Image: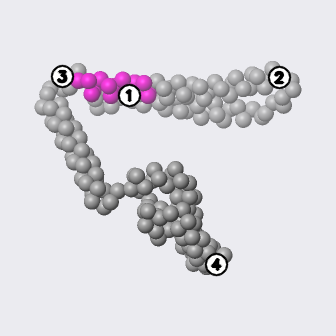
Amino acid sequence: MVNYFHILGLDEDATLNEIKAAYRELAKQYHPDRNPERWAADRFIEVNEAYMFLSDNERRLSYRKRQFNEAERRRRELIYQQWIQNQQQAARKRAAKLADCEYAKFEKSRLFKTAMVINKFSNYFFIGLGIVVVFLPLLAYRNDVANPEIEVRPVYDYLIPMIFGLAFTYGVYYFLFVLKTDQDV
């Protein structure tokens, strides 16, 4: 988390007047018109961000409550790292259990069934998307021709998306239903 007090060079118990004074001093120092260094503009933005945040009393008070000392930050990081390790160990145990069972039993597992449902859904979703891409230009052409107030665009404005849609739909169909993989044979 960004420490806005640190950016302004202040302690976390700084008053609003101290925040304003520090801001004015740093803004003069880092404004791009007064400081030709390339990094000065970035520093100026940081100083303004810190001031805009800390100048609001409610935000400043809630921000102070969320600041942790270094020992607390380390403790929280350690807890998080332990949680990650526990999650990884649990996942490894589940994977080892699935590796020990027969494939027929694995196919009946909730994990495998869920993956297959998601796979089928995504397959049909992409086929449907391809069909929509083919038919939307047809509908647009029909509406443009039926409405005499609208100038009909050139035919290739309708054909190009249809061709891409057909190619996409055929590609999805080919890879899903025609092309045989090792597991399908």
In the structure shown, which secondary structural element does the residue marked by tag 1 occupy?
Answer: helix
| Mark before the other along the chain sequence, 1 or 4 | 4
Q: Amino acid at mark 3?
A: Lys
Q: Amino acid at mark 2?
A: Asn
x and y percentages locating residue 41 in the rendered image: 58, 70
Disc 4: which residue: 34
Considering only vertical position in the picture, is 140 above or below 40?
Answer: above
Q: Residue at x 59, y 35 (%)?
A: 164
- Res. 131 visible in picture: yes
Disc 3: which residue: 105
Magenta residues (range):
109-123
- Is disc 3 in contact with disc 4, using a CB cutoff of under 8 Å? no
Considering only vertical position in the picture, is 23 above or below 90?
Answer: below
Q: Nearer the viewer, residue 45 or 26?
A: 26
x and y percentages locating residue 18 in the rendered image: 53, 68
- Is disc 1 in contact with disc 2, using a CB cutoff of under 8 Å? no
Disc 3/disc 4 C-alpha distance (Å): 72 Å
- Is disc 3 in contact with disc 1, using a CB cutoff of under 8 Å? no
Q: Would residue 30 be found to the left or right of residue 82 on screen?
A: right
Per the rendering, the mark at residue 119 is 1
Disc 2/disc 4 C-alpha distance (Å): 61 Å
Judge whether residue 18 is colored magenta: no
Q: Quadrant of residue 139?
A: top right
Look at the image and tell me in which quarter the C terminus lies.
top left
Q: Amino acid at mark 4?
A: Arg
Q: Would residue 32 be found to the left or right of residue 111 on screen?
A: right
Disc 3/disc 1 C-alpha distance (Å): 19 Å
| Mark before the other along the chain sequence, 2 or 4 | 4
Give the mark toward the camera: 3 or 4: 4
Disc 1/disc 4 C-alpha distance (Å): 59 Å
